[in-house]
Image (tube, rainbow, N blue to C red):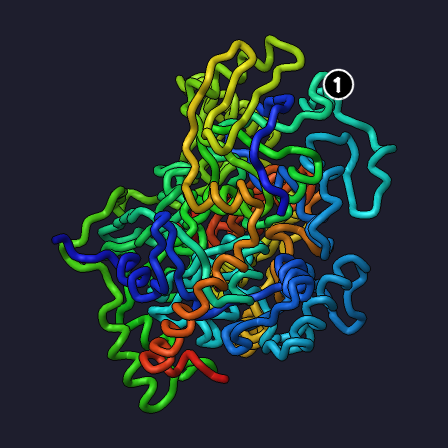
Amino acid sequence: MAGKTLYDKLWDDHLVAENPDGSALIYIDRQLLHEVTSPQAFEGLRLADRKPRRIDANLATPDHNVPTTSRAQGIDDPVSRIQVNTLDANCTEYGITEFTMSDTRQGIVHVVGPEQGYTLPGITMVCGDSHTATHGAFGTLAFGIGTSEVEHVLATQCLRQKKMKNMLVKVDGKLGHGVTAKDIVLAVIGKTGTAGGSGHAIEFAGSAIMDLSMEARMTICNMAIEAGARVGMVAVDQKTIDYVKGRPFAPKGEDWDAAVAAWQDLHSDPDAEFDTVVELRAEDIEPQVTWGTSPEMVVPVSARVPDPAAETNLIKKEGMDRALAYMGLKANMAVGDIPLDRVFIGSCTNSRIEDLREAAEVARGRQVADSIKQAMVVPGSGLVKAQAEAEGLDKIFLEAGFEWREPGCSMCLAMNADRLEPGEHCASTSNRNFEGRQGQGGRTHLVSPAMAAAAAVHGRFVDIRDLEPVQEH
Amino acid sequence: MEAFTKLTGLVAPLDRSNVDTDAIIPKQFLKSIKRTGFGPNLFDEWRYLDHGEPGMDNSTRPLNPDFVLNQPRYEGAEILLARTNFGCGSSREHAPWALLDYGFRCVIAPSFADIFFNNCFKNGILPIVLEEKIVDRLFAEAAANEGYRLTVDLEAETITLPDGDVINFDVEPDRKHSLYHGLDDIGITLQQADAIATYEERRRKQVPWLFND
C-alpha cells in the first residue's frame, strides 16, 4: 500500500464519520470570522434557535470594509459601518474573541491567524473567505467556505465533505536574485491554468519551497485558489515550529513539547502517490506580471503581451481578446510599455513584514514617479504596522512618496474607499486581476512587492533584477 | 431551502469561460447583512452601463443592451448555460444568492469552481456538469431557437431537450438527497451528534491545547 500524503493524514485525523452515501463528516478545529460572510450565518443560527457549539474555536476581526485612513471618526460609509457593527454585536452576544477595528491586533484574517499562533500545524481551519488556504503553509488543512458552511461549523463544529484529490506542485532548485514566492505561485498558475487545481488539495514541495520563509510559504498557499484548489499546503519543518513558538495562542510548556512531537509526522510519506503532479525548476522562474483578467494570464517581465492570433483554442482566444480589450492593451507590446496609474502594496497575499521590507528595500532613497497618481502601502495587521514602524519602514515609504495606511483588505477588493477609477492601471501585490476587482473598470496587474515598488519609482514595470543599487550618501 | 425536483425552464446562454464571483455579484453589494435582494445586481457591471451602488433604484438605471440577460428573449430564464470554471474566485455565497434571487434554479457548464459548486447546493440551485461538446450543442441550439427550454429532472438525473433527446448527468447521492428534499444540512449533521461528541472527547485528550473553554 502506498504511503499517505500530508492531505491524507490531515483528512484521516479529522474524520468523524464516513457515510454510506460517500460523504464524510470532518471535524473543524478552528474558524476565523470576518464581517462580510458571517452576518447571515449568525442570523441563521438565531432563526433556527441554535447556539455556537464551541465559542473557543472561533476568532473574529473585521477586515474587508475597514477604512485604511484614520479610524478616529469610525467608518463613513453607513452600509459598511452596519456590517462591521453587526460583527461586533454578534461576537459580543456569543462571547467570541474579536479584535475590533480599534485593537492593534486587528488586521486581515489571514495575517492575524498565523501572527497570533491561532493557526497551528495539524489542525483543520476554515473561514468564509477563499484565501483561507494561506494557513496551509503551516501543515494545516485550511480552506474557504460559504456562509451556509460558516453557520454549519458554528452549529456543529463539523462539515460534510467529499475527499479531494491529491496534487503535488514541486519546485526544485534555487530562485534567482529578485525572484520571490509571488513569482513562483504566479508561474505555477500560468502553467496549471486557473482551473488546474479544481477538485484537488495542492501540496507545494521541493527544495525551492522548503528554502522559503514561513511568510513566503503563506504567499504561495494563499493563491492556491487562483489555481482552482481550495487547499494549498506545505509540510511542517523546523521553520514552521520556530515561527509558531511563543505566539499568543500557541501551546505552552508541556503542551508545547507534546505539540511539537505530534507535528513531526506532518509531511507526505516518501512513497505517497499524487493524482496530479506539476514540476517547475526555480531557475526558470522570472519575475512575473499579469497582463489580463485572470491570474493565469501571466508572463515574465521580460516577455511581451501574448497575441490571441497565436491561440488555437477558440474559447481561449475569445477570452484573450476580451481581456486585451478590457485592459486596454495591444498584443505583442512589451510588458515595460504598459502604462501605470497606481500602485498597491498589501492584501492577504503580500502585506506581512517581510513583504514590506522587500518593498521598502526598493523604495529606499528613491522617489515615486510623477506619473503615478497614488502608491499606497497597507500593512496586513496593526502588529505588522507597528513592527514596520519600529524598523523605520514607514519613513522610507513616506520619504519616497508612498502613502502609509491602517491595516485591512483595502484595494485588493475595494470594498472600502480604496479603489481604482475606470481605466486606471494598477501594479498590485494582491491576488486577483478580475474585471472590476479593484474598482469598476480598473485594470490590475499582479506582481511581487519588490516589483510593485520598482514599478512605482519608475512609473512602469521594470525587471527588478536590473535595478541598480541606490548610492549611499 | 426550497427543494429542487423537476424544472422546465427557459435557457439563457452566458458565453464566456472563467466567469468569477466578482462578476456574478460585485463587492459593493456584499455589504448587505441579508441573504435576499441581490437579484437586481446580478452581473451588475455587465448588465448596466452606469456604476451600481447599494441602495440605488435599479429600475431606472441604464441597461447594457449587448448583455445577454437584457435581451427580451431571455426574460424569465431559469436555467443558465455557462462555460468552463464558472464561479471561480471568491467564496462569497452572495453569488448563488444573486442567481437564485434573479430566478435561476439551475446552472449548466463543463466545469465549476469548487466553492461555488458547493454553495449552489446549499441554496436550492442545481449545478450540472456536462461534457464540453454537449454544452456546445446546447449553446448552438439556445442561440438558434428563441424560447429554448430544457426539462431538468433531478430524481432521474436527466435533461430533456425540446426535440425529445435525453442527456444524463451525475450528482453525488448526498447532495441529491438534500436538494431533492430541500433539507437543512445542519439538521442532518446534528443527527450524528453522538459521533461528533465521541470524536471531540478523543480530540480533547489528544490535543488539549486546542481547547480553551
Decide if residue A120 is on the left or right side of residue A44. Answer: left
**Image: A309 above or below A2:** above
Foreground of the two, A269 or B207? B207
Pick whichever, B117 or A424, lies toward us.
B117
Nearest to the observer: residue A69 or residue A128: A128
Q: Is residue A449 visible?
A: no
Q: Residues within 10 Å of mark 1 (few under 14, many from 20)?
A: few
Chain letter for mark 1, please.
B
The image shows residue A72, relative to residue B149, as above or below, that is below
Number of numbered tags placed on the structure image: 1
Q: Position of residue A469 (x, y in %)?
A: 43, 57
Name the residue tied to disc 1. Answer: B72
Point 54% across, 62% down: residue:
A365
Q: Position of residue A284 (x, y in %)?
A: 28, 42
Foreground residue among A469 and B23: B23
Residue at image point 61% right, 64% down: A34
Give how far across and how far down residue A248 sits, in percent.
47, 82
* Amino acid under disc 1: Pro
Direction from residue A265 to residue A381 in the image, left or right:
right
Residue at 47%, 41% in the rendered image: B176
Question: For the point 56% across and 22% down, which residue is it?
Answer: B151
Helix, strand or loop for disc 1? helix
Question: Please, is residue A433 above or below residue A429 in the view?
Answer: above
Instruction: Place residue A11 in its image quadrant.
Output: bottom left
